[in-house]
Image (spheres, grey):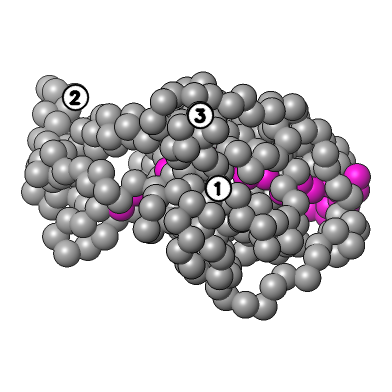
Amino acid sequence: MKNENFTCKNCGGMMKYDPKSQNLKCENCGNEIELPKKISLVRHVLSQYEYNLKKIPEEKTTVIQCESCGATIELSSEKSSANCPYCGSNIVVSEKIMSILEPDGLRPFLIEQKEVKMIFSNWIKKRWFAPNALKNLYQTGKIMGIYLPYWSFDNDADCDYFAEGGIDRTEEYEEDGKTYTRTITDWYPVSGNIQNEFIDVVVPGTRSLQRKLLNKLPEFSVESTIKFNSGYLAGFSSEVFKVPMRDGYEQAKNVMRNTLESLVSSDVLRNYDHVRGIRMNVSWYNEYYRLLMLPVYSTSYLYDKKVYQVVINGENGAITGEYPKSVIKIALAILAGIIIAIIIYNLLKN
C-alpha cells in the first residue's frame, strides 16, 4: 500500500490543496505546485462493472507509516486520506482508493473551510422557527471537508404508459328551487409512449452521512469533472464507496421514474384536463455509469442534548441540514394564521 506525503521541496513544510488557487500550497512558505485539471469524459457500460471491480480488501483498517515523522497509524477501510495525528502531515493512501475502483472524475473544493462559518451563520439566521439561542451557535472544530463517492448514471428510456385522462364539463342542477352549476369530470382510458435521455443522474455512494440530507444538497457540476489526482485530497478526508454500483443504479432509476411519470402526465394533459392512474412499462438501454469524488463539508452541533447534522456543497457553498424548531415560534405562527383568517372572514362577510 503506497501512501503519499505532500511536503514542500523548498522548506519541508506541509502542502495541502488550496481551494482558491486549486493547487497544492505550502502552509509555511506559500510555495505552490500546479495540479492537473484535465476534463475526464470516461464512463463505463454497466456490464463492465464486475470486470472493473477489483477484490475489496477484507481488513477493516489499514496500517501505514507516516513518512514525515515515522509514526504508525491506522486508517479505517472507509478512509483513503487523513492527517497524521502526531505531526499533522497530510497523508493520501493513493492505492487504496484505486484498489477498489478507480474514480472516473472529481470536482475539487472551491469553498475554503473558513468560509463555512459565514455560510452556516447566514443559513441558521434564516431558519425562522429555529430557537434564537441557536443563531449564535457555531462549533468550528467539528467541520470536516471530505470527498464523498457518488455514482453518476446515463441511459435512455423507452416508456409505454397507460392512464386515465379526465375532461371537465359543466352541468346545471336544481336544489331548493334554485339553479346551480357544477363541474363533472369524465374519465377515459389513455395510452401512449414517451422516450427520454438521462444524463448524469447522481446518487451518493456513501453511508456515512444521512442520505436524505445529501439528496437535498443542490447539484454539483458533474458535467465537467476532472481526471482524478490524489493531490486534490491533500488536507481533506475522503471515502471509498460503500453503496455498490448496482444498488446506486436502482436508486437512480427511482429518480428517473419520477421524471418519466411527470413526462407522462404532461403528455396526457396536452389533450385532457386531468390525469390519474398512471402505469408505466419502462425499457432501459444505453446504460452507463461513472464513479465520482465530490466535495462536501460536514458539520454537526449539539443543542438541548441532541445532535443535528449539516452538509455544505464544497463547490458552490449550498447548504442543507437539520435544526430544532421552537415550539413557541410555531404556536405564535399558528395563532397569527388564525387571527388573519378571522380578519379575512369578517371582511368578506361584511
Res 10 label: 3
Instruction: Tell me which amino acid carries mark 1.
Output: Asn
Q: Residue 233, position in %: x, y?
A: 56, 43
Which quarter of the figure is the N terminus placed in?
bottom right
Tell me, yes or no, whether the two marked residues, 3 and 2, touch with CB atoms within 8 Å: no
Magenta-highlighted residues? 276-300
The one nearer the camera, 254 or 281, is 254
Instruction: Tell me which amino acid carries mark 3.
Output: Asn
Q: Residue at x 48, y 61 (%)?
A: 70
Res 5 label: 1
Q: Residue at x 16, y 43 (%)?
A: 137
Can residue 95 be seen?
yes
Q: Is residue 296 magenta?
A: yes
Q: Secondary structure at mark 3?
A: loop
Mark whose residue sits in front, 2 or 1 = 1
Q: Earlier in the sequence, mark 3 or mark 2?
A: 3
Residue wearing tag 2: 348
Instruction: Determine whether, in the image, residue 345 is placed left or right of residue 118.
Output: left
Q: Residue at x 41, y 26 (%)?
A: 29
Tell me, yes or no, whether the two marked residues, 2 and 1, touch with CB atoms within 8 Å: no
The one nearer the camera, 73 or 295, is 73
Q: Residue 210, position in %: x, y?
A: 46, 58
Q: Secondary structure at mark 2?
A: helix
Mark whose residue sits in front, 3 or 2 = 3
Q: Secondary structure at mark 1?
A: strand
Instruction: Determine whether, in the image, residue 41 is placed left or right of residue 333.
Output: right
> Overall secondary structure of the magenta stretch?
strand
